[in-house]
Amino acid sequence: MSSGGVTVKDVSAHDFVKAYAAYLKRTGKLEVPKWVDLVKTGTYKELAPYDQDWYYIRAASVARHVYLRNGVGVGGLKKNYGGRQNRGNRPHHHSSSSGSIARKVMQSLEKIKVLEKDPNGGRRISQDGQKDLDRIAAQIIRATQA
């Protein structure tokens, strides 16, 4: 594969999210809220994330999700990042994740021009954002071929 035709779809999701999160952390452009070390990612969770860099990973994951599916809003991300709520001896049910985190991640990505508002609602990937994401994907492909 030539680097000209590589997109995010050609790379493993796990590898891409790790690489893009590392890139976001390294550049230092992403605005991280002060409260990231205090919050849980959903009401159904018992503990906050153990990983110090969870906000960068979530931002990379959201960027990939919006790249693959334009027009995603806060509600869609809440559903996507939700999980099983433990209800004791009753059956588990799906519970949504925090809307505040989804909103702040999208706002942070908008500030660095990766996402932009979609006229039909939600967010979409910007041209600069698409170039960035495809460049990271091409770097992953080159690293695995070497």
Image (spheres, rainbow, N blue to C red):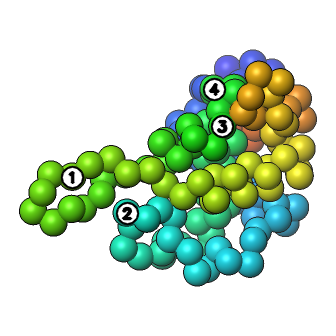
Kind of residue at badge 1: His
Which residue is disc 2 drawn over?
Answer: 44
- State yes or no: discs 3 and 1 in contact (Cβ < 8 Å): no
User: Would residue 42 appear left or right of 34 to someone viewing this image?
Assistant: left
* Coordinates of residue 105 in the picture (x, y in percent): 71, 55
Q: Nearer the viewer, residue 23 or 36?
A: 36
Please count the marks in the image: 4
Q: Secondary structure at mark 3?
A: loop
C-alpha separation, residue under disc 2 versus residue under disc 1:
11 Å
Residue marked by disc 4: 69
Give the percent coordinates (x, y) of residue 139.
73, 40
Please identify the quarter of the rendering in which residue 76 is found. top right
Mark 3 and mark 1: span between their CA atoms?
26 Å
Q: Which mark is residue 92?
A: 1
Task: Residue 117 in the image: state x and y as whole percent.
Answer: 83, 34
Q: Quadrant of residue 58?
A: bottom right
Could you tell which of marks 2 and 4 lies nearer the N-terminus? Answer: 2
> What amino acid is found at the position of numbered circle 4 in the picture?
Arg
Between discs 4 and 1, the one toward the N terminus: 4
Q: Identity of the amino acid at label 3?
A: Gly
Residue at 33% x, 47% y is 94
Q: Quadrant of the N terminus?
A: top right
Kindly tell me whether residue 131 is visible in this rendering.
Answer: no
